[in-house]
Image (cartoon, rainbow, N blue to C red):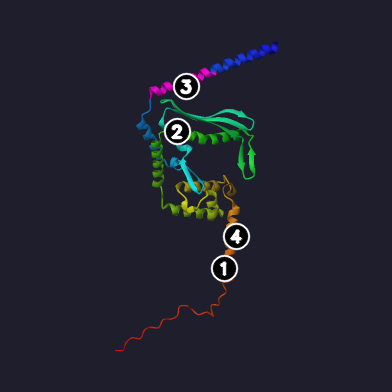
């Protein structure tokens, strides 16, 4: 009977605590809605704040994501740009919540809620506590690694939720402004700067153009401003000792290309015979001057 009484008391305490927590969250939501109604956003000012933020080079460099798929490049606004859009648009509540953590996986939710119009976007997803490596899946047991895995997977869903709330024309104008910012800080033609970057990788770390193209998934002639920014970040990481060449590039690809070139040069050497400079005649023979007519 004592055990039953203790269990009943605990259940009552848990119920009271849950009810108090629910009431507090409800009051917070009501307060947010009240403030949003009292101080509605000025659309023109919000748009101007977004465009002003896109004029910062540090934001413009990370405003777009890009990855290869099916021989083409897929691009779009990054989570960093989406966060700036939400912050400057105003009266938005957005974020990522871990709803439940089970054995080997977590259930999380990304959401974005416009408190003025009561329009809400949310996505519930499951995150496996594992990451893919070259040797297969690696299980995660450290709470910090699990938290970072949930945050990384949730960032893509959060970006989709924010872009589902912000008007599309505002997003397009922000992308155009970031492109203008990148173009304004160029110090020369894009192809020249890419060539210089490839040369620095080759001279400093022995990283060939083929190795870089293998990582990006397409030819260097198709590189854009964002690819150049990515190369700069990788070079800075290698220079500061934060990572190694093996973390970014496959050295076997470079060795394969080098061996192919070596075989090609050997074949050319076999075909060509040694030439004696004393026995050969110069191809540049003297040209006889035409006789001048006698006067």
Q: Which mark is residue 259?
A: 4
Q: Which mark is residue 268?
A: 1
Which residue in the protein does label 3 denote? 29
Camera-side mark, 2 or 1: 2
Instruction: Report the Cα–Cα distance between label 2 and label 3.
Output: 21 Å
Instruction: Report the Cα–Cα distance between label 4 and label 2.
Output: 51 Å
Residue 62 showing in the rendered view: no
Residue at 43% x, 52% y is: 190
Which residue in the protein does label 2 denote? 164
- 151 versus 223 height, above or below: above
Secondary structure at badge 4 equals helix
Secondary structure at badge 1 equals helix
Secondary structure at badge 3 equals helix
Which residue reaches farthest bottom? Answer: 295
Percent position of residue 222, x then y: 47, 51
- Front one among 264 and 56: 264
Residue at 45% x, 36% y is: 82
């Amino acid at each position: 009977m004592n055990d039953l009484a203790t269990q009943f008391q605990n259940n009552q305490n848990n119920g009271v605590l849950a009810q108090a927590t629910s009431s507090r969250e409800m009051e917070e939501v009501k307060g947010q809605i009240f403030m949003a109604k009292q101080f509605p956003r000025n659309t023109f000012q919000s748009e101007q704040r977004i465009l002003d933020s896109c004029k910062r080079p540090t934001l413009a460099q990370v405003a777009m994501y890009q990855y290869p798929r099916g021989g083409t490049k897929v691009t779009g606004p990054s989570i960093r740009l989406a966060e700036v859009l939400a912050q400057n648009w105003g009266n938005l509540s957005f974020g990522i919540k871990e709803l439940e953590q089970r054995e080997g996986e977590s259930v999380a939710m990304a959401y974005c809620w416009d408190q003025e119009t009561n329009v809400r976007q949310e996505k519930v997803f499951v995150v496996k506590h594992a990451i893919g490596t070259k040797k297969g899946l690696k299980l995660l047991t450290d709470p910090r690694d699990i938290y970072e895995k949930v945050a990384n997977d949730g960032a893509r869903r959060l970006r989709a939720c924010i872009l589902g709330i912000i008007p599309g024309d505002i997003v397009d104008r922000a992308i155009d402004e970031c492109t203008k910012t990148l173009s304004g800080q160029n110090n020369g033609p894009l192809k020249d700067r890419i060539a210089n970057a490839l040369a620095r990788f080759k001279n400093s770390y022995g990283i060939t153009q083929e190795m870089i193209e293998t990582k990006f998934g397409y030819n260097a002639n198709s590189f854009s401003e964002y690819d150049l920014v990515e190369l700069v970040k990788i070079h800075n990481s290698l220079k500061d000792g934060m990572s190694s060449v093996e973390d970014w590039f496959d050295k076997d690809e470079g060795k394969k290309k080098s061996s192919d070139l070596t075989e090609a040069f050997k074949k050319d050497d076999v075909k060509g015979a040694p030439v004696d400079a004393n026995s050969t005649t110069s191809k540049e023979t003297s040209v006889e001057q035409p006789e001048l007519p006698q006067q």
